[in-house]
Image (spheres, helix red, strand yellow):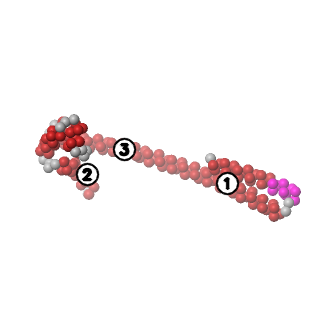
Amino acid sequence: MKDILIAALLAVVMALNFLDVLYDLKMGAAVQHILGETAIVLASAMGFVYLLWERQRRIRQMKALSQTLSEADQQLKNITEDMRNARKRYGETIHQQFNDWSLTHSEQQVAMLMLKGLSLKEIATVRDTKEKTVRQQASGIYGKSGLDGRHALSAWFLEDFLASDAA
C-alpha cells in the first residue's frame, strides 16, 4: 500500500512538473530552467515506473512463496499421515509380539508404558496400582520374553530400525 501511495505522489509530481515545463516552454523560459524541470519529470517517471515494477516483482515473489508454502504444508500433511500410519503399524507389530510372548493384558499395558519411557513408579501411578505389582508384572514380561530388563525390551523393538539404517 505504501508503494502505491509513493508511486501516486511521484505521478502527481511528474504531471505537475510536466505541465510546468509546457508552461515554461510557452512563456519562453531559459533552456537551463526547462532542462532542470525536465530532469525532475524524468526522475519522477523513472521512480514511478520502478516502484510499480518492484511492486509487481514482489507480488509475483509472494505468490511463488505462498505456493511453495502450500506445497510444503501438503507434504507435511502427507508425512504426518505417513507417520500416523507407520506408528499404527508399529503399534500393531508391538502388540503382536506381546501376544506371541503370551503377555496378559496388564503386562501388555505395563510393557507399552515401559517402552514409552515411564518409570515403574510412574506406571503404578498411571495404572492406579502399587509399584510392587508393576515390578512383578515387569518381571513376568522379562521372563516370558526372555529379555534381561527394560533396556533389553526397548532395544528388542528398536534393533530392526537401527540395523536397517546401518545397511
Quadrant of the rendered image containing residue 108: top left
Residue ID for mark 3? 80
Residue ID for mark 1? 49
Q: Is residue 48 above or below residue 134?
A: below
Q: Is residue 109 above or below residue 46?
A: above
Type of the residue with mark 1:
Val
Q: Earlier in the sequence, mark 3 or mark 1?
A: 1
Residue 96 at least partly seen = no
> Residue 24 colored magenta?
yes
Where residue 49 appears, as percent x and y from the top left, is: 67, 54
Residue 20 at least partly seen = yes
Q: Earlier in the sequence, mark 2 or mark 3?
A: 3
Question: Alpha carbon of mark 2 to alpha carbon of mark 3: how far?
Answer: 19 Å
Residue ID for mark 2? 161
User: Could you tell me which secondary element the residue under label 2 belongs to?
Assistant: helix
Magenta extent: 20-28
Type of the residue with mark 2:
Phe
